[in-house]
Image (tube, rainbow, N blue to C red):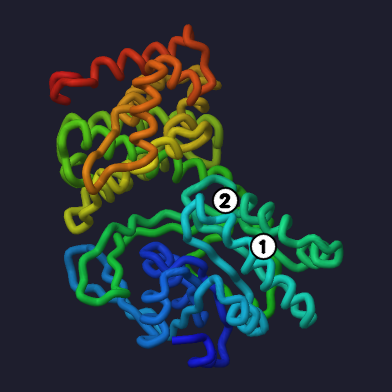
């Protein structure tokens, strides 16, 4: 169904780039509940058509009950349809959000730049752009890509004065969900969306978004989430893969794996508390870790280790969920042995068949061609005589080729 087939109601509009599970189950749902008419922009035509034909979808809260939230009214456009993008830019638009994945994010620069040009030409006021991705400073990356699209000085000045690029931290597990309805999505009950208050522009309409928390210390929230939820999630996945577990639930239900994940989160937690004190207290962070482990143990969330562990090279980037907390510990001379074990497990992740992951295959090929020491040195930036590098290599060799219980 083309854009011309529907008209937007007289209410504030939000554009959500990405109509996948996170876009529909988390960001789009929060915006809809806040009173926005959510227009999803995506490249999957059947999803776009279904959103326009049905004008709504159901979010199933996976808590053991029958809690279903119907999100409506919603619409959708192809994100490559510049005519539709221009038309929406003229609506009472105050926020643009994304949930497309870090690798796709720069591709949104062209349609968002068109929105900015259209609004400038129409003399329209400020809007906020929030990249809701599992990547630190995702909004900054998006801004840099948009600035490259805006070559005119007047456009760049308009961007500076009227476009708020708000960095955020998003936290909700949205696992694969089976339904006979294309648009249905399943989510865990918990969610957290925290945005940097300093980077928000006052917009018209200025809608208070319940479920989006503004803070003046976003860095603390971003690192707490990335170095706790994401760190624990991927370590549980990599250890589960080594022990032939299918899901995170199976993995975290194993006492040995649960203990390792818990120890890793307490190591990263010690660094977070020291860095961000007094923002996080030991007591508060202990409760946060406990909550994370409970979320992994939700019997109604079936999340495959192959999905959570995918793209290990991205997860092994410096500053990300594995090396980020290790570097924080190194700077403060804090215990990090279990986190180093997590890195070793990530280097052994290599699902095959239908679940094969290109990055995991690349890691295995590099190890075979270059040797484990050089690969670890390249990924971490550590010298080959670094004690932490030696521990990763030792853990790698111990983990390789034995049952998990015999390895740990």
Q: Is residue 160 left or right of residue 94?
A: right
Q: Residue 167, located in which quarter of the rendered image? A: bottom right
The answer to whether 324 is drawn above or below residue 338 in the figure is: below
**Residue with the mark numbered 2:** 138
Identify whether 331 is placed above or below 383. Answer: below
> At 40% across and 25% down in the image, what residue appears?
366
- Which residue lies at the image location 40% right of the left edge and 69% below the top edge? 24
In the rendered image, which residue does mark 1 sit on?
200
Q: Quadrant of residue 62?
A: bottom left
Query: Percent x, y for residue 257?
Result: 21, 32
Q: Are marks 1 and 2 in contact (CB under 8 Å)?
A: no
Q: Position of residue 352 (x, y in %)?
A: 23, 40
Is residue 269 something one can see in this rendering? Answer: no
Query: Residue at coordinates 47% horizontally, 59% vertically from top-left?
Result: 100
Secondary structure beneath dot 2 equals helix
Q: Quadrant of the N terminus?
A: bottom left
Mark 2 closeness class: few <14, some 14–19, many ≥20 residues within 10 Å: many
Query: Residue 83 sits in which quadrant?
Result: bottom right
């Amino acid at each position: 169904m083309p854009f011309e087939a529907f008209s937007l109601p007289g209410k504030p509009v939000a554009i959500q780039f990405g109509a996948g599970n996170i876009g529909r189950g988390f960001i789009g749902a929060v915006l809809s509940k806040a009173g926005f008419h959510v227009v999803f922009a995506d490249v999957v035509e059947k999803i776009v058509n279904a959103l326009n034909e049905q004008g709504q979808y159901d979010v199933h809260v996976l808590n053991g009950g029958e809690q279903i939230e119907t999100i409506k009214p919603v619409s959708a456009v192809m994100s490559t349809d510049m005519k539709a993008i221009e038309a929406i830019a003229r609506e009472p638009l105050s926020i643009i959000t994304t949930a497309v994945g870090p690798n796709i994010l720069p591709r949104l620069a062209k349609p968002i730049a068109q929105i900015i040009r259209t609004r400038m030409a129409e003399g329209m006021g400020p809007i906020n752009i929030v990249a809701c991705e599992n990547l630190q400073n995702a909004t900054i990356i998006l801004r840099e890509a948009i600035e490259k699209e805006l070559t005119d000085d007047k456009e760049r000045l308009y961007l500076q004065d009227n476009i708020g690029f708000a960095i955020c931290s998003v936290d909700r597990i949205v696992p694969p969900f089976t339904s006979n309805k294309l648009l249905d999505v399943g989510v865990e009950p918990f969610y957290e969306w925290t945005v940097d208050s300093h980077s928000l522009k006052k917009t018209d309409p200025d809608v208070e978004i319940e479920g989006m928390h503004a803070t003046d210390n976003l860095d603390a929230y971003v690192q707490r989430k990335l170095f706790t939820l994401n760190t624990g999630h991927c370590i549980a996945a990599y250890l589960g893969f080594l022990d032939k577990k299918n899901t995170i639930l199976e993995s975290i239900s194993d006492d040995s794996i649960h203990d390792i994940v818990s120890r890793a989160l307490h190591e990263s937690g010690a660094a977070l508390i020291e860095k961000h004190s007094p923002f996080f207290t030991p007591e508060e962070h202990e409760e946060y870790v406990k909550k994370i482990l409970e979320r992994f143990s939700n019997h109604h969330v079936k999340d495959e280790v192959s999905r959570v562990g995918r793209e290990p090279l991205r997860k092994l980037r410096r500053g990300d969920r594995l090396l980020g907390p290790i570097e924080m510990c190194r700077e403060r001379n804090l215990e990090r042995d279990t986190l180093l074990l997590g890195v070793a497990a990530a280097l052994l992740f290599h699902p095959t068949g239908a679940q094969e992951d290109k990055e995991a295959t690349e890691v295995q090929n590099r190890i075979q061609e270059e040797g484990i020491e050089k690969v670890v040195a390249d990924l971490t930036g550590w010298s080959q005589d670094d004690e932490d590098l030696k521990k990763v290599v030792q853990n790698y060799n111990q983990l390789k080729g034995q049952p998990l219980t015999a390895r740990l």
